Image (cartoon, grey):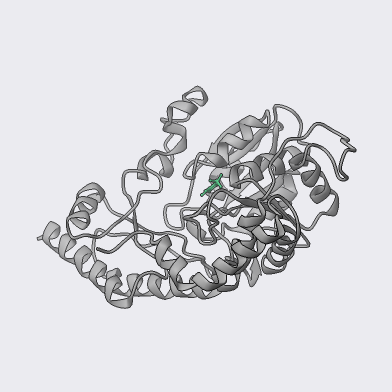
Amino acid sequence: MIKFLDLFYQYQSIQPEIDAAIRSTIEQAAFVGGPAVSAFEQAFATYQQAEHCLGVGNGTDALEIAIEALGLPPGSEILVPANSFIASAEAVTRCGHRVVFTDNDPDTYTINLVDLERRITTRTSAVIGVHLYGHPCDLDGLLRIAGRNDLKIIEDCAQAHGAEYKRRRVGALGDIGTFSFYPGKNLGAYGDAGAIVTNDAELARRCRMIANHGRIEKFDHLIEGRNSRLDGLQAAILSVKLQHLDNWIDRRNVIAGLYLNGLGDLPGVSLPVIREEVRHAFHLFVIRLSERDSLQRFLKNEGIGTGIHYPTALPKLAAYAYLNQASEPMHANTLDHELLSLPIGEHLSDEQVETVILAVRRFMLKAAG
Ligand SMILES: *Cc1c(COP(=O)(O)O)cnc(C)c1O
């Protein structure tokens, strides 16, 4: 059995540290807020090279709070990549803005800047730059276009903890960045958790108020906010795991290298293209082929777990039928049935990766011949 994801394996590899962190948080009874949360916020700000970090309830809340804190004109349009998890778009609508779906590049799968620029109108106020699969989007290009058109940039870093663009960590390169610590993410909690980072002190203060009932001190509610706080237990677990994250990302890059070498010559399979001067976090290793479904079935029979990210482009979901973007000729709208995520993560040995490579090769050579 080659698992797509193995969270219990990871726990076992760091069990004494995790158990001690959980125990200490319970002994202090610091279940919401408290020293573990502050310590993690500081450590994660440093790790992501951002001046401010705020822990919140999950990655979707992080997006909503960030968008609300930006104070964009009500009803304004926000550009969202058509190939992403629905949260990237949901947060826009929930904050009273209009989603405008934008195409993805067919090779890096991040937001396509030519299509993006074409969709800017006088009503556009911001863009959600998703670092999809852990690969930084073209931030220089995005910053240039945003600067020319007075747009805010929200970096959705839910899949990109530790990813770098030109030697700088993602998150605080635009106006504000959001993270998810959903268990399966590269840095995952033992439940729901998320964070917001920014270099803008005022924006950070507004996020902190919104996430905690509109207050800074105990009962001075300055505005109506909401409750989206990071648990002490999750923060303590995340602080332990953060110390291992760079090793885990390095291991993901080694595995990606093995896949790129082992599958590079196969006709009919497109491998992910890595931009120059980036550190890919390789949350996912996504290949593209027309026989996606039969390869997935074949690998399942061989005991190899895979995933699909995402089976339906966002414009084609029932939730977005009202936007009428489902039949637009976008790469995202046509490639969704060709994407397959191969297993990647520190739970895999070189031998297991080799087994996956050989299985994919066998399938493709049989299909060709
Ligand atoms: C996981 C994810 C989110 C949402 O995070 P949650 O913590 O599950 O709310 C948002 N955007 C992207 C791109 C994601 O992958």
Q: Pick out the residue farthest to the left.
A: 369
* The quadrant where residue 172 appears: bottom right
- Residue 38 picture location, percent across and down: 75, 60
Can you say whether 181 is above or below 222 in the image?
Answer: below
Can you say whether 12 is above or below 144 in the image?
Answer: below
- Residue 261 appears left or right of 10: left
Nearest to the observer: residue 130 or residue 108: 130
Residue depicted at 42% across the width and 32% down the height: 316
The answer to whether any part of residue 140 appears in the image is no
- Residue 12 appears left or right of 19: left
Q: Pick out the residue farthest to the top.
A: 322
Nearest to the observer: residue 186 or residue 189: 189
Residue depicted at 38% across the width and 65% down the height: 344
Residue depicted at 60% across the width and 62% down the height: 22
- Residue 330 picture location, percent across and down: 44, 40
Location of the N terminus by quadrant is: bottom left
Location of the C terminus by quadrant is: bottom left
- Residue 262 picture location, percent across and down: 28, 73
In the rendered picture of this protein, how many numbered marks are placed on residues?
0
Can you say whether 49 is above or below 289 in the image?
Answer: below
The answer to whether any part of residue 11 appears in the image is yes
Nearest to the observer: residue 133 or residue 244: 244
- Residue 42 appears left or right of 284: right
Residue depicted at 35% across the width and 70% down the height: 348
Q: Pick out the residue farthest to the front.
A: 27
